[in-house]
Amino acid sequence: DDERQYANGVNIPLFQPSDDTMVLTNAALLGLDYIYRKGFNYQKAGVTLCHLTSKHKMQGNLFNDTISHSRMKVMDTINQRWKGKLKLGSEGVTKEWEMRSQFKSKNYTTNWDQLIIAS
């Protein structure tokens, strides 16, 4: 493959710890804005969450967003009941990509059709 290659990464610290999908998505998109380069065909990307802590052990502050917590609770409840039907607008409505799996291992332990047969 003679395509130009490019790799990069960026850390986007949050002002305060958050479990709000919208806050995390906005941080990921901000990071993408920093590292995206036009003219490259991207094959994979990832988001790493660091310094995770329990919501119940977070230090209180003056900027707690009760609307955010309420919104996420409603979204989580709907998605649990309706199997992830509620999505953020930034997720889009169609899947225009497909995961490559030409190097994927067989599913010997989870798929009956790929079970090894000893003779």
Image (cartoon, rainbow, N blue to C red):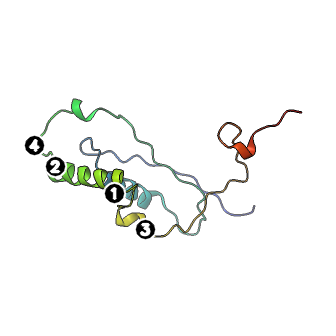
* Disc 3 from disc 4: Cα separation: 34 Å
- Disc 3 residue crowd, few under 14, some 14–19, many 20+, Cα 10 Å: few
Describe residue 2's horizontal placement relative to residue 40 as left or right: right
Give above or below for 51 relative to 103. Answer: above
Q: Image point 38% across, 61% down: which residue?
A: 85
Instruction: Give neighbour class at mark 1: few <14, some 14-19, many 20+ (Cα, 10 Å).
Output: few
Q: Are marks 2 and 3 in contact (CB under 8 Å)?
A: no
Spot occupied by residue 64 in the image (x, y as percentages of width and height): 15, 45
Other-residue count near label 4 (Cα within 10 Å), few / some / many at <14 / 14–19 / ≥20: few
Residue topped by disc 2: 65
Whichever of callouts 1 and 4 sits on the residue coming sooner in the sequence is 1
Residue 15 in the figure: left or right of residue 63: right
**Lower position in the chain sequence, tag 3 or tag 1:** 1
Q: Quadrant of the C terminus?
A: top right
Q: Amino acid at mark 4?
A: Leu
What element does badge 1 sit on? helix
Q: Is residue 36 visible?
A: yes
The residue under the point 74% across, 63% down is: 2
For mark 1, what is the residue?
Answer: 26
Q: How many marks?
A: 4
Of labels 2 and 1, earlier in sequence is 1
Q: Nearer the viewer, mark 2 or mark 1?
A: 2
Cα–Cα gap, marks 2 and 4: 9 Å
Q: Is residue 50 above or below residue 98?
A: above
Above-or-below relation of 92 to 76: below
> Pointers 3 and 1 in contact (CB under 8 A)?
no
Residue designated by label 3: 92
Mark 3–mark 1 distance (CA, rounded to whole Å): 14 Å
Is 117 situated above or below 1? above
Image spot of residue 99 (x, y percent): 61, 57
Q: Please, what is the three-letter code of the amino acid marked with disc 1? A: Asn
